Amino acid sequence: MKILVTGGAGFIGSAVIRYILTHTDDSVVNLDKLTYAGNLESLASVSHHPRYAFEQADICDRAALEEIFVTHRPDAVMHLAAESHVDRSIDGPLAFIQTNVVGTYTLLEVSRSYWQGLEAIEKNQFRFHHVSTDEVFGDLGQSADLFTENTCYSPSSPYSASKASSDHLVRAWYRTYGFPVLVTNCSNNYGPYHFPEKLIPLMILNALEGRSLPVYGEGNQIRDWLYVEDHARALYRVIRKGRLGETYNIGGFNEKTNMEVVRGICDLLMELSPEKPKDICHYRDLIVHVPDRPGHDLRYAIDATKIKNELGWLPDETFETGLRKTVEWYLNHLEWCRRVQDGSYRRERLGIG
C-alpha cells in the first residue's frame, strides 16, 4: 500500500512512519503542516528512504490536499494530524477547533471525493483510519471501570472536545456516505522523540538541569501508559486487518498515577545519570506541587480486549521496560532535545539564523 500519514512529523506520526518503512514493504507520504510540534529531525533515519515522500501542507487547505491526492494516489489515509496539548487548548482553544474539527472535515471531504473516483478494486481496498484519544470519554473518577469502544463521550477540555467532534464526523461519514473508515482511541503515549512539553520528557530534562519537577495537585491523576512503538504496531494492524466502521481502543495495560511516573523517572535517573545537579541528594528532591489544571480528569483507563481478541495485538513493553528505554533514549539524544528546546530545529527549517 501507499499510505498517506497526516501529522507524520509529530510524535506518534513519526513513530508510525518509522515502523512502516522499517517493518513493511509499504510506501508513505508524510503530510505535515510543521507547526511547533512537527519535527522532521524525528524522521532523519528514514528521510532518504526510497518509499518515503514528504508534503508540507495544512489539512484545512482543501486545494493543497486535492493536489497531494492527485499526485500521490494513496491507497489509505492514517489521520494523526492534530493539536494535542491540553494546557495549550485551555489557553487558546481556537487552534484546536480549526485543526481538529475543520481540518478533519476538510480531509474527510477530499478523501471521499478521491475515493469516489477510484476504480472498483481500488475503491474496495481504500481505508481512512482516524486516530483519536481516550480523553474523549472523560473522567472515570474513583470507579474501577474501563473505557470500552461503547463508552459514552464526555470530554472535559477544549482539546478532548475537539477530538470528540472529529470522531463523530468520521463515524457520520461512514454512516451517511458509506465512506470506509476505521477509528482508534489510544491511551497516553510515551517514548522517544516526545515533545519536551509533555510530562515524561519534561520531567527528564528538568531533572537533568536541576530544575523543579512540577506536579499538578497531589499527582494522583491516573493514566494508562502506552509505549509509542507499541501504538505504531497497533495502528498498522488496524489499517491492515480492522473491520470497516469499527472502533478499536488501544491501551498499554499500565495504569500509573502521575506521581508514580515522576518518581519512577527520578529513580531511573539516579541509576543512569548519577552525577546530579549540585545541592540535591536525589532527583526526587526537585518535585514540587503546583495548582491543579482546570477541569483535570482524575482517571483514564482503556479496555483493549477487542483489539487483542480480533486483531491479535498486545503491547510488547511493560511500563517499567518502556520507561527505561525512554529515559535511556533521552540521555543519549540530548542534542535533539536541545534543538527542540531552543527552537533551532524550526529556525533552520525556516532559514532563520
Image: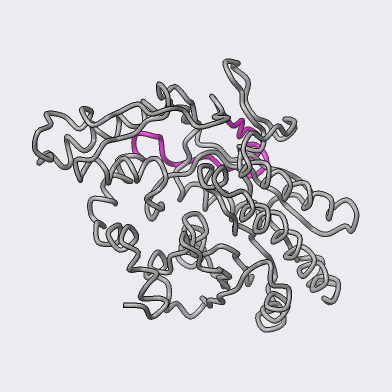
Residue 55 in the figure: left or right of residue 230: right
Report the residue that reaches farthest toward the bottom. Answer: 71
Classify residue 289 as left or right of residue 85.
left
Q: Nearer the viewer, residue 247 or 262?
A: 262
Identify the image's colour scheme: rainbow, by chain, secondary structure or one colour. Answer: one colour
Asked if residue 238 is among those painted magenta in the image, a careful observer would answer no
Please give the name of the residue rendered at 58% of the width and 42% of the height, measured from the top-left corner. Answer: 186
- In the rendered structure, which segment of residues is drawn in magenta? 301-322
Residue 316 lies within the magenta run = yes
Query: Position of 45 compared to 310: left or right?
Result: left
Q: Nearer the viewer, residue 52 or 313?
A: 52
Query: Residue 296: which quarter of the image?
Result: top right
Residue at screen point 76% across, 60% down: 105
| Relative image position of residue 189 (x, y in whole percent) | 48, 44
- Compared with 341, 326 (above or below) is above
Number of marks: 0
**Location of the N terminus (image quadrant):** bottom right
Q: Is residue 98 above or below residue 213?
A: below
Residue 336, horizontal then vertical, whole percent: 30, 61
Q: Position of residue 88 (x, y in %)?
A: 52, 47
Of residue 89 and residue 265, the one placed in the foreground of this image is: 89
Residue at image location 72% in from the left, 34% down from the top: 153
Residue 108 x, y percent position in the rendering: 76, 62
Horizontal relation, residue 172 to residue 280: left or right: right
